Image (cartoon, rainbow, N blue to C red):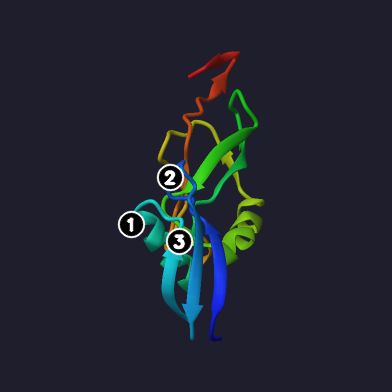
Amino acid sequence: MAGESKHFTCVICPIGCEIDVQLEDGNVVSTEGNKCAKSEEFVLQELKEPMRILTTTIRIRGAKWAMLPVRTDEPIPKRLLFKVIEELANIEMQAPVKVSDVIVSDVAGTGANIVATRNMKREEKGKFV
């Protein structure tokens, strides 16, 4: 693949650098548009295996709200996001839950855990305890 070019938008920080990459035989020859070294690392990771933090919600019973916000505690391969979402669709927690509680360990064999990102108190007789 001589002379291939790719475009990336870096998601490491809020700047969102627009990076153009020139490749020769699959190797990076040059990059333009990156404003820091982290964006170069991002491009190399994207070329190797795109990784993302997944943020979503799962059902919870006995709490003020019906949905509990959760996320992976580390990036997972982007190609597995929908597999993980499907796995989480069948999970329902029971309040109380605390921030950082592990909901699922090693989700979809990624090594990452699904953790709660909000405290959810248990509702008892109209009060939350």
> Decide: marks 1, 2 in contact (CB < 8 A)?
no
Residue 50 visible, this orientation = no
Q: Earlier in the sequence, mark 3 or mark 2?
A: 2
Residue type at the position of mark 1: Ala
Residue type at the position of mark 2: Cys
**Quarter of the image that includes the N terminus:** bottom right
Q: Disc 1 or disc 2, which is closer to the eye?
A: 1
Tell me the crowding category of disc 3: few under 14, some 14 to 19, or many 20 or more residues within 10 angstroms, Cα based.
Answer: few
Task: From the viewer's side, name the closer residue of 56 and 92.
Answer: 56
Residue type at the position of mark 3: Glu
Task: From the viewer's side, name the closer residue of 109 and 95.
Answer: 109
Q: Is residue 29 above or below residue 19?
A: below
Q: Is residue 52 above or below residue 101?
A: below
Residue at 55%, 37% (x, y): give it: 69
Between the residue at mark 1 and the residue at mark 2, the CA separation in whole angstroms equals 12 Å
Residue at 60%, 13% (x, y): give it: 126
Residue that badge 3 annotates: 32
Residue at 48%, 53% (x, y): give it: 10
Residue that badge 1 annotates: 37
Q: Quadrant of residue 4?
A: bottom right
Task: From the viewer's side, name the closer residue of 87 and 25.
Answer: 25
Residue 73 visible, this orientation = yes
Numbered mark located on residue 13 in the image:
2
Residue 40 placement, left or right of 120: left
Q: Disc 3 or disc 2, which is closer to the eye?
A: 3
Q: Earlier in the sequence, mark 3 or mark 1?
A: 3
Q: Quadrant of residue 127?
A: top right
Residue at 45%, 57% (x, y): give it: 75
Residue 46 locus on image (x, y percent): 49, 66
